[in-house]
Image (cartoon, rainbow, N blue to C red):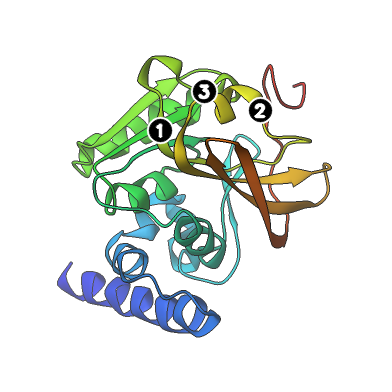
Amino acid sequence: MKEEHIKYERWRKEMVDRQIVDRGISDPMVIDAMLTVPRHLFVNEALTESAYMDYPLPIGEGQTISQPYIIAEMTQSLQLKKSDRVLEIGTGSGYQAAILAHIVSRVYTIERNNTLFMRTRKLFDTLKYHNIVTRYSDGTIGWKSESPFDAIMVTAGGEQIPQPLIDQLAVGGKLVMPVGGLMAQELLLIEKDKSGTNITNLGGCRFVKLIGQHGWKD
């Protein structure tokens, strides 16, 4: 078991050095989280040898765990602080929520697929991520009772940003989401101020579709 632990630590270090830092990710909190979270525990056991590679992996139910660099880029773009409360739309494997949980005080994450929801909730309990709060629901309507949020991350692509999520973002907060068609999107960073929102395009990407009342139809 000790040899396995050392192996995964080495793979994480190589992942961060080659895929994260060498591509310009510099936020020390993001780097530390990526070095710490055991990514191999968030994938199917048959894929653990590929967990730290430079590409997304299937997690079942037609969903994927994103490429490590994309996770780091999205997380860094939010410029998170330790005191922040973050809403994640699309729990999926749970890996992104775990990265966020290492950085901020509380993560609220919503998953619409019950199989994934039950699996990740159990994994969070096993790994003792006590600052992650899970919900089985339509993520496109957000989590109004816990709003406003300092940051919101949407891990699936939609034609437009759901208005409820913009409404639930605190003034001064940031939201990152892939926006576009079914085959390709642009990763957009939305910053909210008293006069409205400002949008920055972070570049092209491809995510699974965001399904829900304010997203794609199932």
In-front residue for pair 43/26:
26
* In the image: residue 150, left or right of residue 214: left
Judging by the rendered image, the residue that carries numbered circle 3 is: 142
- Determine the secondary structure under disc 2: loop
Residue 217 lies in quadrant: top right
In-front residue for pair 18/122:
18
- Estimate the spatial distance between the alpha carbons at disc 2 and disc 1, rounded to whole Å: 15 Å
Q: Residues within 10 Å of mark 1 (few under 14, many from 20)?
A: many
Disc sitting over residue 162 in the figure:
2
- Determine the secondary structure under disc 3: loop
Q: Position of residue 46 (x, y in %)?
A: 48, 56
What type is the residue that disc 2 sits on?
A: Pro
- In the picture, the quarter occupied by the C terminus is top right
Contact between labelled residues 3 and 1, with CB atoms less than 8 Å apart: no
- Estimate the spatial distance between the alpha carbons at disc 1 and disc 3, rounded to whole Å: 10 Å
Contact between labelled residues 1 and 2, with CB atoms less than 8 Å apart: no
* In the image: residue 186, left or right of residue 94: right
Give the residue displayed 36% in from the left and 27% down from the top.
Answer: 134
- In the picture, the quarter occupied by the N terminus is bottom left
Q: Examine the rendered structure and indicate whether residue 30 appears above or below residue 133.
A: below
Disc sitting over residue 165 in the figure:
none
Judging by the rendered image, the residue that carries numbered circle 1 is: 149
